[in-house]
Image (cartoon, grey):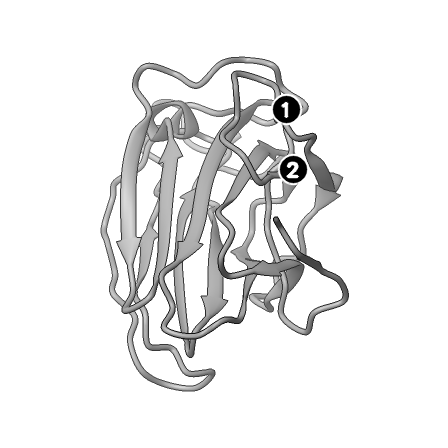
Amino acid sequence: MRRRIGGGVVVGVLGVVLCAAPASAASETEVVQGEYVRLVSVADWDRAAAMAPGESMRWDLEISADAPEPGTLTIAMSAAGETPLVVDAALCFEEWQGETCPGGAEDLRAAWEISRDGELVTLEEFDAADVANLRLQVGVLGGSAGDTTQMRVYAIGAGERVGTGPGLSPTGGWSASPWLLGGGAMLLVGTASLILVRSARQNGGAS
């Protein structure tokens, strides 16, 4: 039986679905594995590259752990950059069946313009024995050619932190460059993957 935990210190998950479009066949799967914590990311980054202001994309994440002792996992998010982003987030403790969470989804954020100061925002904490399926709908609000915002989702628990995330641009065009983060403060024992996005539109320049 699932045990929910309220009011955690670092809790976070992102994933609501206001957009009913199904996941694209071009979706890419990335697995980020720490010593105990595992994060699986599924998204169509080609669609992300082509987004203009007012458009959005779906990003699904599965968060789980195989920890040696009972505990909790925290899901958190951060963003930094020039492009304003809006996020809807929903959480399901069963696998999503299309647009439906069989056990009922928990809406975590709706039309949330995420702060771009790089600070972690905690969204949810749950029993580490559970598997959380986070669904995000991320939209671009505006911006200029060449602007980007780097957004990350983290799973924190069992003495480690793992994370993944894209850079989003309002003009389209991107190149992927993975980064591994290890050690440092906050017991960063896991790995983090970052995709940097750059504008590739050259015709006409910035408007």
Residue at the spot 45% in from the left edge and 30% down from the top edge? 171
Depth check: 38 or 142 in front?
38
User: Outermost residue toward the front?
Assistant: 1
Q: Is residue 148 left or right of residue 182?
A: right
Mark 2 is surrounded, within 10 Å at the Cα level, by few (under 14), some (14 to 19) or many (20 or more) other residues, namely: many
Q: Give residue 7's position: percent from left, percent from top.
A: 76, 67
Q: Which mark is residue 81?
A: none
Q: In front: 133, or 145?
A: 133
Q: Secondary structure at mark 2?
A: strand
Residue 98 position (above or below residue 134): above
Measure the C-alpha gap from mark 2 to mark 1.
20 Å
Q: Nearer the viewer, residue 16 or 78?
A: 16
> SS at mark 1?
loop
Which class describes the residues within 10 Å of circle 1: few (<14), some (14-19), or many (20+)?
few
N-term mark: 2 or 1: 1
- What residue sits right under mark 2 in the picture? 90
Residue 54 - label: 1
Q: Which residue shows up at 31% across the image and 33% down it? A: 200
Where residue 18 sits: x, y (%)? Answer: 68, 23
Instruction: Give the residue furthest to the bottom.
Output: 185
